[in-house]
Image (spheres, grey):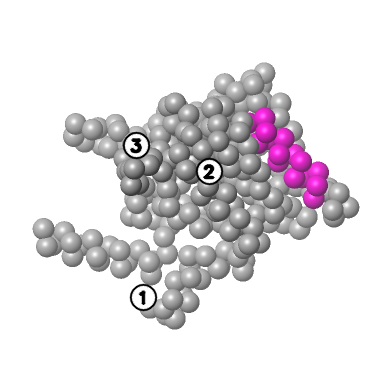
Amino acid sequence: MKGNGLKSWIDEMFSLEIKNPPHKPKGAINVIVYDNTSVPPPGAFTVGDKVKLLFNDPATTLTFWWKIGAFIDQLQFFADYTVAAANWDQALRGVLQAVDDKTKRQGSPATVASLQFWGHGAPGRSFMGNDSLDKASLTPGGAHADLVAQVAAKMHPTEASVWFRQCNTFMGADGQEFARAASRAFGRTVVGHTFIIHAWQSGTEFLLTGQQPDWDDGEGTKKHGKNKGKPLVSDPLRHRTVNMFRLYPPLERGEFIIPPTILAPMRRALSRLAADE
């Protein structure tokens, strides 16, 4: 690692975002909404499908970690409000309440800059508890369309994004349809993942308003062998990976997002391991 060693690493991974927030205009707020029900709903993909932690499925304890993560983001002065929700009605009303609270505090209309949803996911579906946000529920007349439209009206007109920080929401054809529907409903850039995510979060794709998905609908799945089509778990060297401490979504194009000073040593280490095999 070149430069100032640890300081350079910290700057590249974390503090540069704090020192130079790219998506928080004056009077706007950042909001994190997390699922407070713990247990993943049927159909959700989780890292627990692949890994067991001692005798417990880590997926059933994720609410604890989401709560801790939201608190850390508040300590870093990133998250202005955090909302714990058991369903999408609570989640969306919580965002509206946060905007109203900020508006009263500052005496002028507030908007939402960064909106993140932390919970379980599946291709084309974003969960809060057992409640699913999907193409059908986002379409006018759908179960959540009216509240989403109210939230969309509170988003900052030019500097805003909605990040579904959940497993597999943008994976496959269903994931691409969900991205289109979410982009239309919120009227802003939407971000999601094609891989199963944990501390590392791979396949971080984004869709700008009015555009079409440009990622492969097979991204995030095994391409060969008897497990072809099965979902893959994130790791640092997979396509468009961020870590759980990333504050703002990556809205730049490119295969790798990890800073070069971090990525290069990882690649060298893997090359040495491969040479020893």
Residue drawn at x 75%, y 39% as measured from the top left: 96
**Occupied quadrant, residue 195:** top left
Three-letter amino acid code at the position of disc 2: Thr
> Is residue 94 rendered magenta in the image?
yes
Q: Magenta segment range?
A: 88-102
Q: Which residue is mark 3?
A: 49
Residue placed farthest to the top in the image? 141
Q: Residues within 10 Å of mark 1 (few under 14, many from 20)?
A: few
Of pointers 2 and 1, the one earlier in the residue sequence: 1
Mark 2 vs mark 3: in front: 2
Could you tell me residue 125's position as x and y percent?
Answer: 50, 30
Query: Which type of secondary structure does the marked residue at label 1 adopt?
Result: loop
Determine whether 130 is above or below 163 in the image.
above
Q: Which residue is mark 1?
A: 1
Could you tell me residue 61's position as x and y percent?
Answer: 47, 43
Could you give the CA–CA distance between mark 2 and mark 3, rounded to whole angstroms?
Answer: 17 Å
Could you give the CA–CA distance between mark 3 and mark 1, rounded to whole angstroms?
Answer: 35 Å
| Residue 46 marker | none
Could you give the CA–CA distance between mark 2 and mark 1, rounded to whole angstroms?
Answer: 35 Å
**Occupied quadrant, residue 261:** bottom left
